[in-house]
Amino acid sequence: MSATAPVSAQAYSNRARALIHQRRYDLAEQEARRAIQQDPAYATGYHLLSIALWGQEQIAAALTACEEALRLAPEDGYIHSTLADLLSKQRDWRKRRRAAEHHRRAIALCPNDAFVRNRYAHFLFRTNRAEAVRQNAEALRLNPQHVDSLIYRATLLVSKRRYREAEESVLQALALQPNNELAHRQLGDVRLFQQKPDQALDNMREALRLDPTNKQLKRGLILALQARLPLLGKFWALSLMNSWAYRVLWLLCLPVALSVCCVLATVNVKADAGILLLRLGIICFFGLFFLGGLFAWIIDPLMTYLVLHGKIK
């Protein structure tokens, strides 16, 4: 950050920060650019610009702005944390390795900051779950009322199937911030795993009411609507997977499944009870396989289209 930043640049950055908090990223971008125009060496302006661009899903531009912010303020832990988050969005493993380095640098610069530790916990979820739990717990030790850490603690508890504790953690977050849309979304997720689709739907709708343009929240509404479908509702968890990967796998397995079902249905074997039960079990298994394909190829895309285009709310 420039040591003598003009007041006008600080004023623009304050407006940008408030607009980011309101999820009005396009307007926040304008204010951040005005701050930079007033003081081209103002690191905070570039940092806020990167967050505003990230909110508009302009990841490459956000990355460029954040790197410039870090060049101007190399000892700012929050900038390191934001840069790490942006790098982790890349599919390049080398950038993900850089992301880990920036997360660790952020913690070294801000060891007592709950936000920085919780962001590192997010990053570690897929690669080192135990360390993710430790970093999240440390964040909550530093600040027991840190809402983002309470919400993420619920995510970690769901991964261990500790749904009651996860629900309690989110409810604690909502007691602190009743209008936190991410907390409502997380509570909806927890209730889906608790097999409470009606309550989950209420939570997802409330989250989307608070932030109507958020695609992740719309995805939560889709999950809750899918979970309420007769019979096919049991397949809602497939939406948590890579849908295209599942569809490709389904296509590859389809010839085998059809062949097995045809053989079992036509081959005349001795009417032994064990053989009949085995045949029935295999047919039921592949019946579920076909229903999963119906869900992945028709139900999920159709409901996604209807929700994203405002046909279902």
Image (cartoon, grey):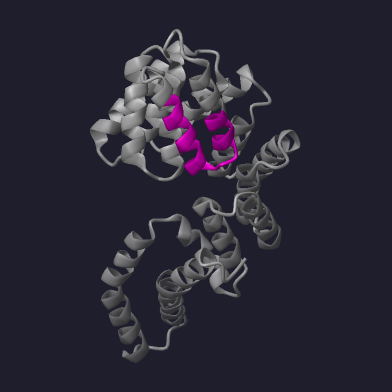
Magenta residues, as a range? 15-36
Q: Depth check: 245 or 58 in front?
A: 58
Viewer-nearest residue: 210 or 126: 210
The picture places residue 97, in percent across and down from the top left corner, at 29, 28
Q: What residue lies at 55% left-to-right and 62% top-to-bottom?
A: 222
| Residue 124 visible here | no
Whether 228 is drawn above or below 271: the answer is above
Task: Tell me where residue 116 appears, x and y as whole percent.
Answer: 50, 23
Instruction: Please identify the quadrant where the N terminus is shown.
Output: top left
Quadrant assignment, res 127: top left
Q: Can you name the residue that lies furthest to the right here? A: 175
Image vertical order of residue 125 relative to residue 296, above or below: above
Residue reaching furthest to the top? 3
Q: In this view, does 176 lie to the left or right of 59?
A: right
Left or right for 37, reference 168 = left
Q: Which of 125 and 273 is in front in this view?
A: 125
User: In the image, residue 15 lies at what x, y percent?
Assistant: 56, 30
| Residue 60 higher or lower than 256, as above or below | above
Q: Does the magenta stretch include residue 164?
A: no
Give the residue drawn at x 39%, y 26%. Answer: 37
Q: To which quarter of the image does residue 248 belong? A: bottom left
In the image, residue 254 lies at what x, y percent?
30, 75
